Image (spheres, rainbow, N blue to C red):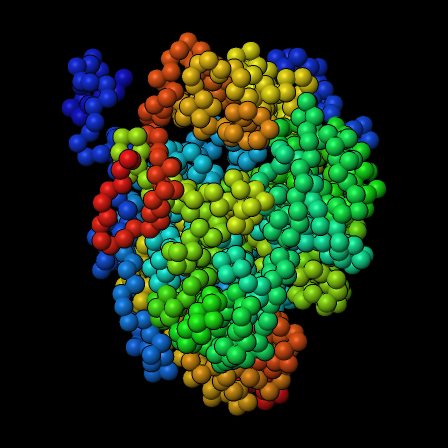
Amino acid sequence: MSMNNVGRPTRPEAANDAPASHATLTGARGLLQDEALIFELDGWNKTGVDLPDAAAPSDDLAGLLRAEPIGLPGLSEPEVVRHYVRLSQKNHAIDLALYPLGSCTMKHNPRLNEKMARLPGFSDIHPLQPTSTVQGALTLMDRLAHWLKTLTGMPAVALTPKAGAHGELCGLLAIRAAHEAAGNGHRKTVLAPTSAHGTNPATAAFVGYTVVEIAQTEDGRVDLADLESKLGDHVAAIMVTNPNTCGLFERDVVEIARLTHAAGAYFYCDGANFNAIVGRVRPGDLGVDAMHINLHKTFSTPHGGGGPGAGPVVLSAALAPFAPTPWLVHDDGGFSLAEHAGEAGAETAFGRMSAFHGQMGMYVRAYAYMLSHGADGLRQVAEDAVLNANYVKARLKDVMSPAFPDGPCMHEALFDDSWLEGTGVTTLDFAKAMIDEGFHPMTMYFPLVVHGAMLIEPTETESKQELDRFIAALRALAGAAKAGDTERFKGAPYHAPLRRLDETLAARKPRLRWKPVAAAPLAAE
Amino acid sequence: MRYLPLTPEDRVEMLGAIGVKSIDDLFVDVPASARRDAPVDLPHHAGELEVEREMAALARRNRSAGEGPFFCGAGAYRHHVPATVDHIIQRSEFLTSYTPYQPEIAQGTLQVLFEFQTQVAALTGMEVANASLYDGSTGAAEAVMMAHRITRRGKAVMSGGVHPHYVGAIETLAHAAGVATTRMPAAVDAEDAVIAAIDADTACVVVQTPNVFGTVTDVSKIAQAAQAAGALLIVVTTEAVSYGLLKSPGEMGADIAVAEGQSIGNGLNFGGPYVGLFACKEKFVRQMPGRLCGETVDADGQRGFVLTLSTREQHIRRDKATSNICTNSGLCALAFSIHMSLLGETGLRKLAALNHQKALALRDALKTVPGVEILTPRFFNEFAIRVPKNAADLVETLANNGVIAGVPFSRLDAGAGLDDVLLVAATETTLDIDITVFAKALTKVFAQ
């Protein structure tokens, strides 16, 4: 029972007269403030940083100085804190509730890793200071590499790629360099299943390869006969995700690798779903030549509202010589870095992918995560992730329609929208209604091979109680949809900070920045 | 295991609900030859205290910038980051959220991105900016690819002042896509030399200001020459604080402005994660790489923000996408934006002036050291000096004496014949005593 400010118990009954959905006068909704843009807070002459005065710039820079105002607002520290805390309250987060985005792996981010990444010995070192002064950092990179190689059963790893898609680029460039070195530069085709992540064909096209799709079998796997018919002297590589984007393990993966190698092509594995098999299966044992590992997925570095990621790529012996610079080199004097292609230690490197050595901040977090789990814990991670997904699938299969009902799934459970047929409710509507119930929706309309796809990935860091809460919510919603309560779905969300947003309008009349001269408010036509 | 909520009893009960006997039954699709019955050969799990000890031992073996005199720049800069920045980016709602695919419950992240885009557009003097890329160097490479798409021409021309590692990142991407590159010889003060290399097949000209030697250049003339020839001008900046003092790329006629945003809100972190700033003229927006956030309204007519123009992106366009990029550098962009909001125009201008002043003090001190030649004629907060010996050896010697003297140019470009060139930077974190100690140490080494 709550108390009011004069110490008397409140009486909720008294509020029953008020309409249920009474709009407020200020736009705020209880704890949720209606927060203006930073540009609208009248901070044109303020600052939240105290700095000593500086002398006027030297004459050397005459004619090179900014003449006009920049147009940047500033605020005092308390105002800045309030602005961002108010905004933060309009975000869903894994720390708040289950976040079942299939293929994205929203798992708990341990705070120990944040603390470790902030040790000055890691956070306050410069990428180009003498290598003799950063032996601890280089040792950490070497140990991280050792863990990644051991867990994947692969002989080499390129740490520098900055995200999964950057890792794909790294892998394909290594493959291309290997083909060119062997006089096979004419191989210009990449095969990828229709269910692939969009980054796979985008990356292949980016490096000048033509993408040909591989068909899928009825049970959601690569069609071996179709693959075999499309392999040939023109194929540079195949790109296959395993476990695949339907949440299934490619049963014939060893045969896929054999056929690929027999045709003279390389096997690029999209490792986005490595979290399902870490510690139980080593991709090296499956015949993979290159695979990126999303440290922000499998090894739980925070997603931060869309990055930064990190996408180290493990490489087979055939591809290892072509890995990008810088390379970590070890000799009697300790660790050093071979920075330039052609330099001793990096003779055949295909080049450089970015200015420095990759996402060190993510290496620190991932390594702390690995040490915490250990070999035994990482195996348990995979097992619990798979167990949780199968549990969700088992508990929902009678009210929703699993896309591949036979056999177990891996770390994510895929449903199609056939169970919504005739209800007037779409996958999108269903997802928006989940928001009202306090859950982030699952991945929708991906993979493309399943109609109205709903891909649920609970991850291993959800308790059974939270899973049961989630399952109960989805069962209740499924019941409501089938009972004809379409209004609950069509207008959803009703209880989020905003109602459904007009994405078409945003694309048709792009307004990509605030402007000093107020434009007329946008309105749907 | 502290991060795993399931109990042994839960697991048994859940296996029962699924209708299988053991966890192995859920891994039946794995070929028998690849199943591992035991954990891999790595240490077992460890408690928080043990992990902390091991990590701290590694951290102690690095000499952090804050420990003493420190003058490294060349694309990464040590600045003071207000405590507020790190506090806010560690809020659960920012730290542990995903890409804002469901805008109704991601308005926090989306409004921040809209504000970030506006701040970056203002700083660069450009019409539009995206929601960030991985870092400055990959941004530069993406800019070249964008110019190639817009002009349908096959060559990029780079000045001798572009950071050699940026050149490397550009070459990797450009060559993979069949775009040729020409790079002018490394030169302290010759951005204008690119003009002579522009021809009818030139898609873009890439220049840097302040350049890798610290030289500040008005690139207006290059912009005119490039645009007259139907090419785009890409202006790269590795020190974002310089925007507070110097003419912006937009003012000088840039078509695309790219920068490393690390200096604002983000620590050195041994090279990453950083945040790439990317801005361009509005007419090119549909060829831009990366995420964009835009304003719209919700079903009740309330203002809100969404990711937009995604028909450029890989998840929609697949092999026809403008880029394969799937993530931005969200949390680093947030840090940038918070720091920028704290600074404001007043603070940024002051910070920039302070940086310049510290660098002038450094120059004046080094000028008095016998044997040192100042090479950079006009600079913001870093410059190049010529020393009477191998710069890499010198840096090593000084490091043994507690001074991190800067970046030998040979570390960036081993083949330029500039082994006696050292790049030095000063920021608001540089103390007068640091400068004195550096000058004295140099004098002593040269006298030996």
- Give the quarter of the image for residue B165: bottom right
Task: Note whether A360 is above or below B214 in the view shown.
Answer: above
| B411 sits left or right of A493 in the view | right
Q: Quadrant of the N terminus of chain A?
A: top left
Q: Quadrant of the C terminus of chain A?
A: top left
At 35% from the left and 34% from the top, the residue drawn is A501
At 26% from the left and 34% from the top, the residue drawn is B301
Task: Note whether B173 is above or below A217 in the view shown.
Answer: below
- The residue closer to the viewer here, A193 or B446, is A193
Number of marks drawn: 0
Task: Note whether A224 is above or below A127 in the view shown.
Answer: above
Q: Position of residue A61 (x, y in %)?
A: 36, 79
| A4 sits left or right of B179 in the view | left
- Give the quarter of the image for residue A160: bottom right
Report whether residue B82 is seen: no
At 64% from the left and 81% from the top, the residue drawn is B417
